[in-house]
Image (spheres, rainbow, N blue to C red):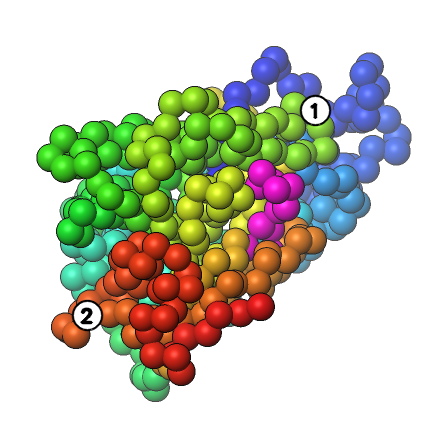
Amino acid sequence: MHIRQRCSGALAAAWLFAAGATLAAAPEDPLLPLTSAYVRAVKPGEQVDTYRELFGTVLQRVRRGYAQEVDLPLLIAAALKTIEPLKPESGEPAAVFKAAINAALAALDPHSGYLDAREQREQRSSISGSFGGLGIEVDMAEGLVRVVAPIEDTPAARAGLRSGDLIVRFDNQPVLGMTLSDAISRMRGQPGTPITLVIRRPGRHDEFTVSLVRETIRRQALRWSMEEDVLVLRLAAFISSVGAQVDKAISDASAAHAPRAVILDMRGNPGGLLNQAVLTADTFLSQGEIVSLRGRTPGNRRSWKANAAERLAGVPMVVLLDGASASAAELVAAALQDNGRATVMGQRSYGKGSVQSIISLGAERGALRLTTALYHSPSGRTVQRTGVGPDIELVAAPGAPVGRGGRREADRAHALPGLDEPAPPKARVEAARCAPPKSGADQAIACALAFLKAGAIETFLTALAPEESAALP
């Protein structure tokens, strides 16, 4: 989840311990070993001083705004570890800086990092919902890029890439050793340009090659349909303007026939913009808190409350989640669940309860993506590491694919700690028992429709075979 944040005022070129005390001039400067090693390792040129000073700028921002207290010596040691093996005057200044500062930021958590100018532009395009690329959602596993899901009708989907595939090489470049942001940058690019991926697929002994051509990816964040008299909103990501899209979908659907119930399907939704998540939750609430941010500094603490206007007021509601539902999707689900507005159905969500601010570092200097707060649901709990627990757990059939390969936030290196376990489910249901007898049926939607028709958990369970479902104490 991202917050757009603009730097205010010009930052000093050197690290400041306190007002008026410039670290660069102090003999005990803790950055000196890092900046000295950097200058020795990179090729001489105009860029050297720019990036040497940028170490201080970035680490100052980290110290001031990170969600927790920062161990600066630990970060400096992590950065030095990438620089010290380099031969003198061998590295490109920008590349060495990026590798070193990202190594430092990776010691904080999996979501903080440095974006160079190109990556910063690509991120802006991604937030708008349109970018040049392959149409694939990915994460990292075993040091490789893992396919979470291809986007429908994109080069990745048409090439047959599957959830769980591991990308071993981009063209002739090994993936091992890349950061996730580097890998994403390599997959994105101008529409019409080719790229070759080497794929390792679970269950196959041989690696194979897939050739693709980049296209303009216009991700459709929201699709809606009427299933009988139930409005189904399939929300794939929280890109810009998606809150308004949800409102319009409700208006368009209601113009033909007022929905008797609503299903908000956020399975596989990786998150996105905080403000759009707040707007989406507020659409279905008329009172109560939506979310609160709790950071270390006063500027990173805030809460949002629902306004009185509510769409589909009083209409029964189900929220569908799975293990790939993350971040902003978890915020919305927790807000609706805690306020008693919706029944959550599916599997426990991913567990990313942190918020990242995007801090510009100046023209062509890139940006800092920094974890500045954890968000808390109306009940006061955070989903960090633990996720949102369903009221009704849908148990998948043995061997069924699992979102993000079954990995969650808690499995990632340096994931921030979480304290609050969600309440256990009130019932568990084998999802296959809800599906109509036809090929390719969406079992989770079928379960949600059956529950809405039943009107209560007990009635819903009674309609299923007793050995396939169970109410829990």
Location of residue 7 by image quarter: top right
Q: Is disc 1 placed on a helix, strand or loop?
A: helix
- Judge from the rendering whether residue 461 lies leftward or rightward of residue 53; answer left or right: left
Image location (x, y in percent) of residue 202: 36, 79
Who is closer to the viewer here, 457 or 11?
A: 457
Picture layout, residue 63 above or below residue 321: above
Q: Residues within 10 Å of mark 1 (few under 14, many from 20)?
A: few
Q: Is residue 355 left or right of residue 278?
A: right
Q: Quadrant of residue 316?
A: top left
Q: CA distance from mark 1 to mark 2?
A: 52 Å
Quick check: can you spot residue 270? no
Q: Earlier in the sequence, mark 1 or mark 2?
A: 1
Give the prevailing secondary structure in the magenta stretch. loop
Q: Which mark is residue 322?
A: none
Percent coordinates x, y for residue 263 in the rendering? 30, 48
Q: Amino acid at mark 2?
A: Pro
Residue that label 1 marks = 298
Q: Is residue 145 above or below residue 67?
A: below
The residue type indicated by label 1 comes to Pro
Q: Is residue 381 magenta?
A: yes
User: Is 156 above or below relative to 41?
Assistant: below
Q: Residue at x 61, y 13 (%)?
A: 9
Which x, y percent locates residue 140?
47, 61
- The residue identified by callout 2 is 436
In the displayed structure image, the side of residue 138 where residue 248 appears, left or right: left
- Can you give x and y, in whole percent of width and height, for residue 47 in the image? 54, 31
Q: Which residues are magenta?
A: 375-387
Name the foreground residue: 393 vs 314: 314
